[in-house]
Amino acid sequence: MFKEKEITASIKTETKVPLGFRAGGIHCGIKRSRKDLALIVSDFPATAAAVFTTNKVQAAPVLVSKMVLAKSKFHKAIIVNSGNANACTGDNGYSDALRMINETAAELGIDANEIFVASTGVIGEPLPVEKIISGIHSVNSVLSGRDFTGAAEAIMTTDTFTKTVSSTFQIDGEEITIYGMAKGSGMIHPNMATMLGFVLTDAKIDKEIFQTLLKETTDKTFNRIIVDGDTSTNDMVIALANGASGATIIPQTESYRIFEEELYKILKSLSIDIVRDGEGATKLIEITVEGARTDEDAVKAARTIALSPLVKTAVHGEDANWGRIIAAVGYSKIDFDPEKFEIIINGVQILYQNYSVTLSNAEANQSLKSKNIYMTIRLNGGKGRATCWTCDLSAEYVKINGSYRS
Amino acid sequence: MFKEKEITASIKTETKVPLGFRAGGIHCGIKRSRKDLALIVSDFPATAAAVFTTNKVQAAPVLVSKMVLAKSKFHKAIIVNSGNANACTGDNGYSDALRMINETAAELGIDANEIFVASTGVIGEPLPVEKIISGIHSVNSVLSGRDFTGAAEAIMTTDTFTKTVSSTFQIDGEEITIYGMAKGSGMIHPNMATMLGFVLTDAKIDKEIFQTLLKETTDKTFNRIIVDGDTSTNDMVIALANGASGATIIPQTESYRIFEEELYKILKSLSIDIVRDGEGATKLIEITVEGARTDEDAVKAARTIALSPLVKTAVHGEDANWGRIIAAVGYSKIDFDPEKFEIIINGVQILYQNYSVTLSNAEANQSLKSKNIYMTIRLNGGKGRATCWTCDLSAEYVKINGSYRS
């Protein structure tokens, strides 16, 4: 269970940027007035790891970045636009994504295959690529400012706050920093949706090892957050490790264990920020399922609860309607004994085994009064355990999504 | 595609009741003032068919009715209460469900194993069984009124209108009637949720054949409606065929084909009524997917679209945001070529192949102005075809479900 302190830390605390990275964000004209173009550059060749959306429909920047990941051993930059997803845009969209990396390459004097491209925004509208191209020149000129906050702003869509976090720690006497920024607030699903995450570190780590580590950590963080069950066409997490700190991460040593733990904290913090910023969200819900037959079963149960509109509206209405929670696990397709079900919300046991209850409804509802809801489900049928994060479902969500495009 | 006329018919038209059935509904005191107890009786032994919720957590009346279905060759009655689901109520709940059939049996002078029991309402609260028992006596006394509308009212929870429909047709010169009533408005999912359906016919049909037919027809109707993706602990459809018309339905003959078609119409009409009455719904959406590789793929695609909160809120906001539709199919786990995707809404082609669009957003949005939305998705990749029904997602849904229990 994370602490109240830990959640807010990622938003309020000043972040530290790792050595050898620059970034900037500007307004290039896709959106009316807000920043919409970000560039992140490593001054040294970095090993890269990346995970991409599992949606069958993949936006042009996803296809291009996958190719770029495979084509080059080291990478140096990420160019990102918001306001237009460049998805369902056919061959023209693909050419536009290539143009974005080619123009950035020319501007920075590096190879196009060293540059990742990402886009987020409306699907199915042609990319205003000329605006982006002229923007790419301006972004480069502001890079000297190391404006990471500007970059974090420029990748936002319906986000209401920037999501950045960093961690600095020692390995073998060397100071290492991991920095992360993300965007995402709606359309979020375990399989990654309208969600971009960029992770930068000055540690040195082998490309293949980094890839495995990023994939595993993403599965436990970004793939465990649920806003509304929709999975987008554009999502990706890209991580760059440029080695500028002089410290190397070596598998099966203490350095790896520490780095893994810190990376997990960074991705978890960004994940929770995305949920907290869920469209129309008023409460953050952490759901931990314990005592499932397997960890996989625990994930299924936690996800099904997190996806249930009935549970999410009950939490919104501060109604400790435990029947909806047990019913959700009932259709999650896992094996369990309903009579052994226990529910604890914010430290208050709402349901004991054998459907036993000791509190009045009014007393139970008190457990839902706070902004952060920690829900623990004990199935008492094994050692499987998993945590997911979601938010409540409010009338505001409907308003935002009924009028997003128009 | 169903006709506007056809939809409203099920609500407005007077229904006809088959021969040899009686019904009544009263207020027994579970709810504050609305009817909450219904009894349906066949004057002749009827063959019964039934389908039950697939939720792992099954309410006591579901367990009892399953037993009753297996124990007796013929059945004569259905006793139903609303306002309390008798779910997650343990051994006491099971005894209470048995008491409901035993008291009804004593009152009617028939065997308890000839009586089905159903409950719907709040989960996890003890059943006020004494109120129900005294109510059972009153219900019997009003049965002479053949008050089917009263029974249809008494099974409602958050429903805003009663759902009844009938069809009368000829087989071999004999007149047959099929009558259906249902309740359900929220928590509806393809696998049947807080949904009760009772089908009565004066045809004669073999029990096993009736069971197969009911199961198949339910799969194409009640299991194709989606309100919010939640599946309840209590749902069942029970069908009784008492043979009072003198007509017999024989497999592999014209009689079977006609009966099958009429039964499908009845269940489809009730299904659409449930969607139309979806909590907070302002629009009915019929989603037909054509050109999938298989029918199963078409069902998966149609269901995923129907479940997507982003699609449902876009329809609510009358925003023809086709990117959300294609993205939903993208994560439905079926194989298709996104570039062959076509979308037609209410006769207007919103999207052509190769992501091609001929209308402005404002023009496309016109297609969503009406109350009934017929959405056709052409995948152009095979002969698979399926239809699902859902409703839009409104701010009202959140209000209803944030405060249902309190």
Image (cartoon, coloured by chain):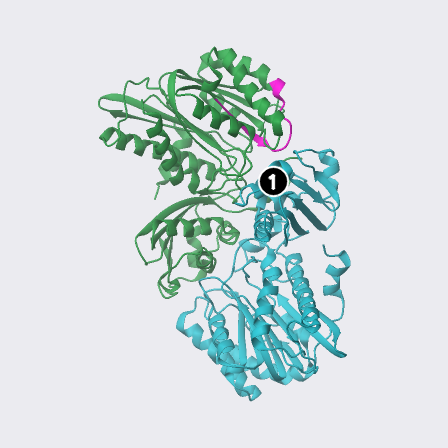
Chain colours: A green, B cyan
Q: Let me know if residue B205 appears in the view.
A: yes
Q: Is residue A24 above or below residue B353?
A: above
Q: What stretch is highlighted in magenta?
A: A116-131
Q: In this view, does A49 lie above or below A385?
A: above
> Which amino acid lies under the numbered mark 1 shown in the image of this protein?
Ile
Check if residue B37 falls in the magenta segment.
no
Residue at the spot 46% in from the left edge and 76% down from the top edge: B96
Q: Where is residue A189 in the image (x, y as percent from the top left)?
A: 49, 42
Q: Mark 1 points at which residue?
A: B326
Residue toward you, B241 or A290? B241
* Residue B274, horizontal then vertical, whole percent: 64, 60
Q: Which image quadrant: the N terminus of chain A?
A: top left
- Image point (58%, 58%), residue name: B186
Question: In the depicted view, which residue is nearer to us: A113 or A364?
Answer: A113
Report the label total.
1
Q: Is residue B29 left or right of residue A211?
A: right
User: Where residue B129 sits in the image (x, y, percent)?
Assistant: 49, 76
Q: Mark 1 lies on which chain?
A: B
Local crowd at mark 1 within 10 Å, few (<14), some, or many (≥20)?
A: many
Q: Is residue B304 left or right of residue A69?
A: right
